[in-house]
Amino acid sequence: MHRRSFLRGTGGAIAALTFAENASAQNNGTIRIGSDIPYRPFEYRTKTGELVGFDVDIANAVFEGQLDRNYEFVQTSFDTIIPSLNNGNFRVIMSAMTITPERSKQVDFSDPYFTAYQTVLILKNSDITSLQDLKGETVAVQKGTTGEAAAQDLKKQFNGDLTIDSYDQIPGAFSALGNNQAAAVINDNTVNAEFAQQNDNVTFLKGEGAAQEQGKENAPPYLTLTVEEYGIAFRKNDDQLKNQVNDALSTIRDNGTYDELYNKYFQTPGGTTSG
């Protein structure tokens, strides 16, 4: 039985549901999953409209494969995704979401299921050769992300001499780079890598950074600003489902399913894209 479905937007019928109705449905029925789409390769649609990606496949392995539950993805903006979760629009968040202390005040997280790094994507013909070269330039980021936070930290290092343009979704930031409206995009490494694989005119800013400083195995061969862990987010006190999901994540790691899915999206002929 194919249990996956997809809802576009969080308005309309979803907004009409009361929190109590949602809670009742969630206890026994379909698990609604909030996600910012597209964020390739974690969640995106093919040309035929099919929803695919690493998060999508992990959701299938966890909810259908291990918990025998129906599930559906609900498209929502990343910068409002936590309030939407807490308002009862969906049961969990799976959206390449980094576990941070600030977010942990608002939601509970599963055990980490993915390691990511904030990185800097530039044009190949750019004069930018080091992080310091971004001083006085414009960088593009997605609203509400740890990429935006990394850019804000960099702005502090530059004593304010950095312009940050924040976009609702990451394709807008990539377009700004391609149109020379920004000197760089600061974003998760695997998402930047996916874009770079499809666009020959962009590349990662090189250099050693946070991954090397923390002694990470298989550290990416480019500059990393942060080391982060993704988690599945739950409303506070949704402990039963969180514990079930943690058990399921542990099982798919142990039985090889996780590695199979990881290699499907991040293994390349030249090696792995560290994540």
Image: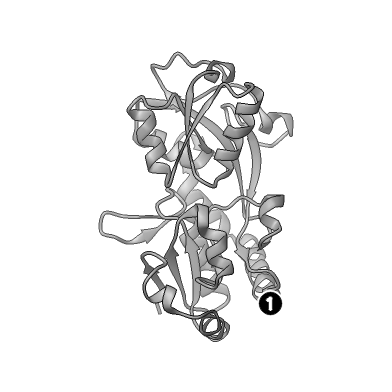
| Residue occupying the point 49% across, 64% down | 34
Q: Position of residue 117 (x, y in %)?
A: 60, 38
- Direction from residue 65 to residue 4 in the image, left or right: left
Q: Position of residue 243 (x, y in %)?
A: 69, 72
Judging from the image, what secondary structure is the residue with disc 1 in?
Answer: helix
Q: Nearer the viewer, residue 239 or 137?
A: 137
Q: Position of residue 150 (x, y in %)?
A: 60, 35
| Residue occupying the point 39% across, 58% down | 52
| Residue occupying the point 64% across, 75% down | 241
Colouring scheme applied when the structure was drawn: one colour
- Direction from residue 12 to residue 130 in the image, left or right: right
Whether residue 115 is situated above or below residue 212 in the rendered picture: below
Q: Quadrant of residue 154?
A: top right
Q: Residue furthest left?
A: 48
The answer, for residue 245, to whether it is visible in the render is yes
Residue at label 1?
A: 240
Question: Which quarter of the rendering shows the N terminus?
Answer: bottom left
Residue type, numbered disc 1: Gln
The answer, for residue 268, to whether it is visible in the render is no
Q: Nearer the viewer, residue 125 or 69?
A: 125
Q: Nearer the viewer, residue 42 or 168?
A: 168
Q: Residue furthest top?
A: 127
Q: Position of residue 134 (x, y in %)?
A: 53, 20
Question: Which quarter of the rendering shows the C terminus?
Answer: top right
Whether residue 69 is situated above or below residue 8 in the rendered picture: below
| Residue occupying the point 53% across, 51% down | 262
Q: Residue furthest front?
A: 160
